[in-house]
């Protein structure tokens, strides 16, 4: 057997997941219940929920991979998917930025300094990319062809500067075939997306926010409007870089 799965084998194993595997929402529900019953302050509940629910998506993917007998061939320094458009809500952007604020000083400053260089260096490409309507059918390919790296990609190491809080699209796009398919194609057919897990993550995050909101807690998120406001990740970070946190 080849070290890598081919496209047909990947489709067959993914069909096995579709037919025989059911996501258990109890894993997500338990996080909600535990945090809402905790003594953590409001910000801690939100940020712990944010990180734990993202991690639960990773665990769920791992359970599905074990069920289907698949193992991703993505590796540290392979950053081809870091050139895809990443679309997140304003709520997610605020949670990411709030979490980065809690990073150690040196790590935080490295990110902020990188953004200063990034938005200056890529201004022309960004102007084009951020004007692409992400609802259009060919938006992903058009964006990818710009060869614009994610603002969280460290150009020195080719790794994510905020890996533990990377958004759902970054977690759910995985390659089980030869890694060269990502190097040789803008839109390779082999990688598989678990993006459907976004609904479980966002549903749980929304439950936490709604409970806190209805309890009259002071949130750093404008709920519920921030849940429905979407844009490219670079767009949110560009606003913060130009105008500060208050821009969001």
Image (cartoon, helix red, strand yellow):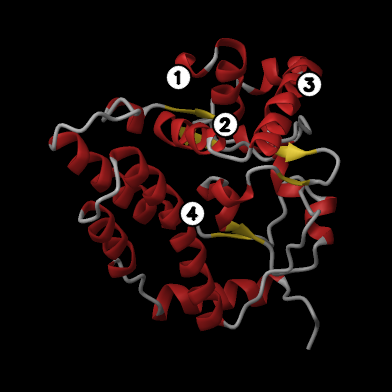
The residue beneath circle 3 is 117
* x then y, percent, for residue 87: 52, 35
Q: For the residue labelled by badge 1, is the local secondary structure a helix, a strand or a loop? A: loop
The image quadrant that residue 111 belongs to is: top right
- How far apart are the alpha carbons under marks 2 and 4? 16 Å
- Label 1 environment density (alpha carbons within 10 Å; few <14, some 14–19, many ≥20): some
Q: Residue at x 21, y 39 (%)?
A: 212
The residue beneath circle 1 is 248
Nearer to us: label 2 or label 3: 3
Using the image as rendered, state which of residue 21 and residue 82 is in the foreground: 82
Q: For the residue labelled by badge 4, is the local secondary structure a helix, a strand or a loop? A: helix
- Label 2 environment density (alpha carbons within 10 Å; few <14, some 14–19, many ≥20): many
As drawn, 212 above or below 65: above
- How far apart are the alpha carbons under marks 2 and 1? 12 Å
* x then y, percent, for residue 93: 48, 32
The residue beneath circle 4 is 195
Q: Are marks 4 and 1 in contact (CB under 8 Å)?
A: no
Nearer to us: label 4 or label 3: 3
């Amino acid at each position: 057997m080849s070290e890598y799965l081919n496209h047909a084998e990947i489709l067959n194993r993914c069909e096995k997941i579709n037919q025989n595997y059911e996501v258990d929402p109890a894993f997500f529900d338990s996080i909600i219940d535990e945090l809402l019953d905790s003594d953590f302050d409001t910000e801690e509940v939100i940020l712990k929920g944010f990180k734990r629910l993202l991690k639960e998506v990773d665990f769920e993917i791992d359970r599905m991979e074990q069920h289907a007998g698949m193992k991703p061939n993505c590796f540290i320094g392979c950053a081809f998917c870091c050139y895809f458009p990443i679309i997140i809500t304003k709520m997610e952007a605020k949670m990411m930025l709030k979490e980065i604020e809690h990073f150690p000083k040196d790590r935080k400053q490295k990110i902020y300094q990188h953004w200063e260089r990034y938005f200056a260096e890529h201004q022309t490409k960004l102007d084009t990319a951020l004007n692409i309507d992400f609802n259009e059918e060919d938006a992903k390919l058009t964006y990818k062809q710009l060869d614009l790296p994610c603002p969280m990609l460290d150009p020195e190491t080719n790794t994510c500067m905020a890996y533990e809080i990377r958004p759902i699209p970054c977690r759910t796009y995985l390659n089980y075939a030869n890694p060269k398919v990502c190097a040789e194609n803008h839109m390779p057919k082999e990688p598989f997306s678990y993006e459907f897990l976004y609904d479980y993550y966002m549903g749980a995050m929304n439950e936490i926010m709604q409970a806190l909101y209805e309890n009259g807690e002071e949130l750093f998120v404008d709920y519920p409007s921030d849940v429905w406001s979407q844009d490219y990740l670079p767009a949110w970070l560009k606003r913060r870089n130009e105008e500060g946190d208050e821009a969001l």
